[in-house]
Image: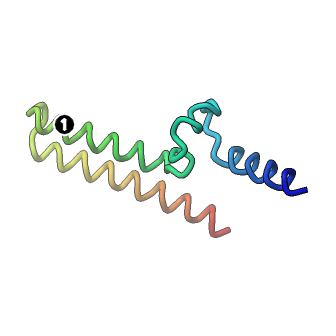
Amino acid sequence: MKKIILFLTLVFMFGCSYEGKQLGSYLEDPGSIIKDPHFEEYQSKRDDLESQYLRKEITYAEYLEKLNELEEMYSKEVQERQQVISY
């Protein structure tokens, strides 16, 4: 009975965290189960934007403008997700 409960719990956890990844990727990096893909995407875009500024591909004004747009977009996504959760 305990094995069945453990199995169902594991299936539930993997089902809730599945994002098109192979099961092996979760076994290699177990911490990826609790990572937020939206935040990771936001962080990646923010890092790319900062890299562009540091390589002097964009001006500081352009950097701030794009950074504000990115933060507004992420804030909207967070609010939408919280609304879905609260209903």
Residue shown at the point (62%, 61%) measured from the top left? 84
Q: Amino acid at mark 1?
A: Ser
Can you give x and y, in whole percent of width and height, for residue 18 in the image?
65, 41
Quarter of image, res 48: top left
The kind of secondary structure element at disc 1 is: helix
Residue tagged 1: 51
Residue shown at the point (48%, 54%) measured from the top left? 77
Taking the image as shown, residue 65 lies to the left or right of residue 41, namely left
Can you give x and y, in whole percent of width and height, for residue 30 in the image?
55, 44
Can you give x and y, in whole percent of width and height, for residue 76 in the image?
45, 57
Q: Nearer the viewer, residue 67 or 34?
A: 34
Residue shown at the point (87%, 51%) measured from the top left? 4
Identify the colour scheme used.
rainbow
Quarter of the picture holding the C terminus: bottom right
Can you give x and y, in whole percent of width and height, for residue 61 in the image?
12, 47
Q: Please, which residue is most extreme toward the right here? A: 1
Compared to residue 23, the image places residue 1 above or below, namely: below
- The mark total stands at 1
